């Protein structure tokens, strides 16, 4: 039996390979598995196959260089206790959460319905490779290791995939090298997983590494663990994270995994905001191909880009010189400071599914290093959904860091619906400027335009002054970028008080209308828009004096930095001391140095200065609180009865600095362009005091220029003036008084006056009241010649100019025919058409000297005369009334040596003329009455005894000539070509019309033979 048993065993042992080969072939054939292999060894415990290939020889499901299988016999039969493989390659497919190894699956026992469990087999893999085809992409798995699969296996598992797609997520160059250990049927994995690039729902990853530590369930359908991450860059939605590090915990299966994320970043940027450090902490879940996250994101050292901060610069200078200037400057500085550095804190949740997703921000806070704080919280939060858009239902608060405190309520009815809200902003101050806003209502449409309405109350500096509570309804439209539009429609503008340059205006309001599309428009840093106002009526005070400003219409364009005004009127001071300025048109623009422009049709009056300004035109400049004007204008007398005609002021230069006005210019007669005077004016608007200095370098009068072209005061008083006048005048004024003085002089002037022609008038006048033309008493004028009917020379007149265009003649004296001619004191009133009386006194006049003035060739006389010549001048002319000349005791002689051309004058006529050839008289009286320019009636009465000289001698004549004779002579003739009547002076044409015919007649007579003039007639 023993020998037989040994023989049987030996036989079987020797036949073990064919038997095993038959057994294997039958088993593989029964399962339809093509195979190739070589049996290298069949033992009682270990079997070794080489060159094993299962499946399609062209694409085998398994290929191994060698396989060793350890078997053991037990009460339940034979079983595999260990498997060892040399280099081996398998092909597998992952589908529906299950892995299929192709034809190898036919070798696996049918499912018993029991949960999956790792077999109790020792496995040794020297070099294993699995080419795993998955729905997400091919994966190559490498495995080496040894140990019991249900407890004790240890090895290295490697996996690599060129690309994996999970819905919207795509990962490239995924590589993992994991240490595998199995304890108590639960595998654990530990090692790095790296990723070159990834994109998931717009979130992109550039190089990432996860140091994985995971424990799988015994059924291998789930697990838990954590991964320590290191990411070079993570970006998405405009955000960028660099140098990310942190951990990701997970638990669950491959199709449903959840966990916690804790990531830190050294450098980050989102929506143009950069940060030096960031963190993201929260819970996530990946299930059904979708990713959900709920957590918190923080950014430290967050700052806006320099380009964004630089974009605030154009705003900083907006409104310079206006109350809004300090407000805008402080706000811009605060925004720039807040934008430099701060901490962001956001609490949000996100859901990402294939083709759709959303991000919900429940709280967003910003704490700047400058102290500024902004928080968005409450309501349903800020929701961004794709596709769909943004929906906001939350509240926001802003405070600190130089920014105004504000509360905002934001709400959208649905995606794409307008965003509406209301803001409550606390008053905001910067220096003396203060901004107060009523509740701000705003609406943001889907086109990106935000419409804002509120009412602004603004106080602050304006120029060198201050405005209080300047209020304006505000209608703003903002496109979310660099385009801002304010008030495209008319709105009321009001203020509580306006103070500038000493001007103080109380509460007032005007209507402000836009130009160029809006009151203010900012486009890409360029300011556009403009406004128009009018009519405007403002009243207040300048210093202690009342002030009023009116404007018919005004416009300005911010883009062109140009403005115009029409119908500008300014009234400063009380009615009796009012400074008045009216400007028809005013235009200007903003330059680098300030404001400049031109004006036309301006006029007015400066305080109590009795000058009316009109037709002013020129240029103006305003810079460094200094207003300067230059140009030309017309100057007229402000008196009810003008004392001078309008003058043209040229080279006028006016400056206003603070309350001080200074002006200079030169006055010209406008029709002849004759220089009249240089004027310098200074006026203080605050005190109402000032002065004007007039310098007359020298006015030359002659045939081409007469005083009546300057003033009507000389009309009918003097004419035919030839000479020069120079001097200076000074006018001073205060709110209480107006004074003036001056000194004027002439070295020698010829003229025709109502009292006769005069030459060589010289002297100096000291005015105590220049405006009233009033002088001190005792003014002296020397007159070379004067002919009020009788020519006199080298006279001296003392006089005083009185108010109302009157002259008080104190004394007038002339040497006259070795005697004297004096003028009695009198007052001549040239202010109205009335009689003016001059009485000349004759004392000690020598008859022979007197006759020499008349150049009588045939008349000689002697005697000393006294008398008076009362003269009356009125609108009808000048005349002598009751003029008398009486010879002094002692008488004189008369000798008429002329020849008679008419022979038949009768006996007595011949006797009378012969007696006059030599007559000694004892008395002689001349009485003169009549107009100086008409037929003067002169009555001469004298008595004497003829001397018989030159008469024919006869007895009768010898006797008669010894008789006393009394002559009564009446002469009617022109009186030595006196000046025309005073009436003619009122119209020089009357002189021409009256005298031209006589001059022509005289010229014709000179051409005819000489005849005896009609100065004599037949004497009865």
Image: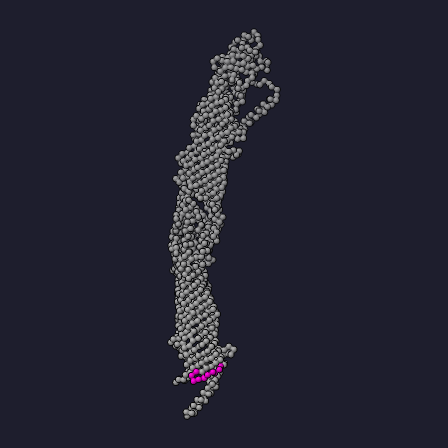
Count of number-bearing discs: 0
Q: Percent position (x, y) of residue 895?
A: 54, 14
Nearer to the camera, 534 or 843: 843
Q: Which colouring convention does the figure follow? A: one colour
Q: Percent position (x, y) of residue 484?
A: 46, 53
Nearer to the camera, 467 or 126: 126
Spot the residue most to the top: 955
**On screen, residue 725 above or below 346:** above
Say which quadrant the C terminus sits in.
Answer: top right
**On screen, residue 39 above or below 468:** below
> Residue, x 43% and y 65% (percent of image)?
231
Dominant secondary structure (helix, strand or loop) of the stretch shown in magenta:
strand
Q: Magenta residues?
A: 37-46
Nearer to the camera, 671 or 261: 261
Q: Is residue 399 visible?
A: no
**On screen, residue 693 above or below 880:** below
Say which quadrant the N terminus sits in.
Answer: bottom left
Nearer to the camera, 343 or 499: 343
Is-magenta flag for residue 339? no
Is-magenta flag for residue 38? yes
**In which quadrant of the rendered view does residue 729 lie?**
top left
Q: Percent position (x, y) of residue 493?
A: 43, 47
> Residue, x 43% and y 61% (percent of image)?
268
> Residue, x 47% and y 15% (percent of image)?
888
Q: Is residue 739 visible?
A: yes
Q: Percent position (x, y) of residue 471?
A: 41, 48
């Amino acid at each position: 039996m023993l020998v037989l048993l040994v023989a049987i065993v030996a036989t079987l042992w020797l036949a073990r390979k064919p038997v095993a080969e038959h057994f294997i072939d039958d088993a593989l054939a029964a399962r339809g598995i093509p195979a190739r292999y070589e049996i290298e060894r069949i033992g009682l415990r270990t079997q070794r196959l080489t060159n094993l290939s299962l499946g399609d020889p062209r694409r085998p499901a398994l290929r191994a260089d060698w396989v060793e299988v350890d078997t053991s016999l037990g009460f339940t039969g034979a079983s595999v206790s260990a498997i060892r493989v040399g280099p081996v390659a398998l092909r597998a497919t992952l589908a529906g959460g299950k892995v299929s190894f192709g034809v190898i699956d036919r070798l696996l026992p049918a499912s018993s319905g029991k949960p999956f469990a790792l077999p109790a087999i020792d496995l040794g893999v020297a070099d294993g490779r699995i080419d795993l085809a998955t729905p997400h992409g091919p994966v190559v798995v490498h495995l080496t290791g040894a140990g019991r699969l249900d407890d004790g296996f240890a090895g290295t598992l490697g996996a690599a995939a060129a690309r994996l797609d999970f819905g919207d997520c795509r990962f490239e160059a995924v590589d993992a090298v994991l240490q595998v250990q199995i304890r108590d049927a639960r595998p654990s994995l530990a090692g790095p997983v790296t990723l070159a690039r990834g994109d998931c729902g717009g979130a992109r990853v550039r190089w990432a590494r996860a140091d994985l530590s995971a424990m799988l369930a015994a059924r291998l359908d789930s697990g838990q663990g954590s991964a320590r991450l290191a990411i070079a860059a993570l970006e998405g939605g405009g955000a960028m994270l660099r140098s990310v590090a942190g951990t990701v915990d997970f638990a669950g299966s491959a199709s449903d995994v959840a966990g916690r994320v804790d990531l830190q970043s050294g450098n980050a940027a989102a929506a143009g905001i950069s940060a030096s450090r960031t963190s993201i902490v929260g819970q996530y879940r990946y299930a059904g191909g979708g990713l959900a996250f709920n957590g918190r994101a923080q950014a430290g050292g967050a700052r806006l880009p320099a380009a964004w901060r630089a974009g605030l610069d154009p705003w900083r200078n907006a409104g310079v010189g206006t109350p809004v200037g300090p407000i805008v400057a402080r706000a811009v500085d605060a925004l720039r400071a807040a934008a430099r550095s701060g901490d962001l804190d956001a609490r949000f949740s996100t859901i990402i599914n294939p083709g759709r997703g959303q991000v919900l921000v429940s709280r967003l806070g910003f704490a700047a290093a400058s102290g500024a704080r902004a928080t968005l919280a409450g309501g349903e939060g800020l929701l961004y959904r794709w596709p769909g858009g943004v929906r906001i239902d939350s509240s926001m608060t802003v405070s600190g860091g130089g920014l105004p405190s504000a509360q905002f309520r934001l709400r959208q009815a649905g995606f794409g619906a307008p965003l509406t809200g209301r803001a409550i902003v606390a008053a905001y101050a910067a220096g003396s400027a203060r901004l107060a806003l009523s509740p701000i209502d705003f609406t943001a449409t889907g086109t990106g335009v935000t419409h804002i309405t509120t009412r602004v109350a603004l106080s602050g500096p304006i120029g060198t002054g201050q405005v209080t509570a300047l209020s304006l309804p505000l209608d703003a439209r903002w496109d979310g970028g660099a385009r801002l539009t304010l008030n495209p429609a008319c709105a009321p503008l009001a203020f509580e008080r306006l103070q500038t340059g000493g001007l103080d205006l109380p509460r007032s309001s005007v209507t402000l209308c836009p130009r160029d599309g809006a009151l203010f428009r900012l486009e890409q840093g360029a300011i556009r828009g403009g406004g128009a106002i009018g009519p405007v009526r403002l009243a207040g005070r300048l210093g202690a004096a009342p002030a009023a400003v009116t404007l018919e219409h005004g416009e300005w364009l911010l883009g062109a930095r140009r403005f115009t005004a029409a119908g500008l009127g300014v009234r400063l001071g009380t009615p009796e001391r009012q400074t008045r300025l009216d400007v028809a048109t005013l235009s200007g623009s903003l330059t680098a140095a300030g404001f400049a422009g031109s004006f036309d049709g301006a006029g007015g009056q400066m305080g109590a200065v009795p000058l009316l300004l009109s037709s002013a035109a020129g240029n103006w400049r305003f810079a460094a609180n200094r207003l300067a004007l230059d140009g030309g204008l017309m100057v007229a007398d402000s008196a009810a009865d003008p004392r001078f005609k309008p003058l043209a002021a040229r080279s006028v230069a006016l400056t206003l600095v603070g309350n001080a006005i200074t002006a200079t210019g030169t006055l010209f007669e406008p029709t002849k362009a004759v220089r009249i005077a240089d004027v310098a004016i200074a006026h203080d608007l605050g005190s109402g005091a000032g002065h004007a200095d007039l310098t007359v370098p020298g006015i030359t009068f002659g045939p081409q220029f007469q005083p009546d072209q300057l003033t009507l005061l000389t009309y009918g008083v003097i004419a035919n003036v030839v000479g020069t006048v120079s001097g200076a005048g000074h006018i001073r004024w205060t709110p209480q008084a107006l004074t003036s003085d001056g000194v004027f002089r002439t070295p020698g002037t010829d003229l025709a006056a109502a009292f006769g022609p005069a030459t060589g008038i010289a002297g100096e006048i000291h005015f105590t009241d220049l405006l009233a033309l009033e002088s001190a008493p005792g003014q002296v004028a020397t007159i070379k010649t004067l002919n009020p009917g009788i020519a006199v020379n080298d006279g001296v007149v003392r006089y005083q100019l009185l108010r109302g265009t009157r002259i008080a003649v104190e004394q007038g004296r002339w040497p006259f025919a070795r005697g004297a001619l004096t003028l009695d004191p009198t007052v001549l009133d040239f202010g109205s058409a009335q009689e003016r009386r001059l009485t000349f006194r004759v004392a000690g006049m020598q008859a022979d000297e007197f006759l020499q003035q008349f150049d009588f060739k045939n008349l000689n006389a002697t005697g000393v005369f006294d008398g008076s010549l009362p003269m009356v001048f009125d609108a009808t002319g000048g005349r002598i009334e009751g003029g008398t000349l009486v010879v002094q005791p002692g008488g004189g002689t008369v000798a008429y040596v002329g020849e008679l051309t008419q022979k038949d004058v009768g006996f007595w006529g011949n006797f009378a003329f012969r007696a006059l050839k030599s007559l000694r008289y004892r008395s002689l009286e001349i009485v003169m009455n009549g107009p100086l320019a008409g037929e003067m009636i002169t009555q001469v009465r004298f008595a004497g005894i003829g001397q018989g000289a030159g008469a024919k001698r006869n007895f009768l004549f010898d006797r008669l000539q010894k008789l006393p004779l009394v002559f009564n002579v009446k002469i009617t003739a022109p009186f030595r070509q006196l000046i025309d009547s005073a009436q003619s002076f009122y119209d020089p044409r009357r002189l021409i019309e009256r005298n031209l015919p006589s001059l022509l007649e005289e010229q014709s007579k000179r051409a005819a033979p000489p005849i005896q003039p009609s100065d004599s007639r037949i004497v009865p």
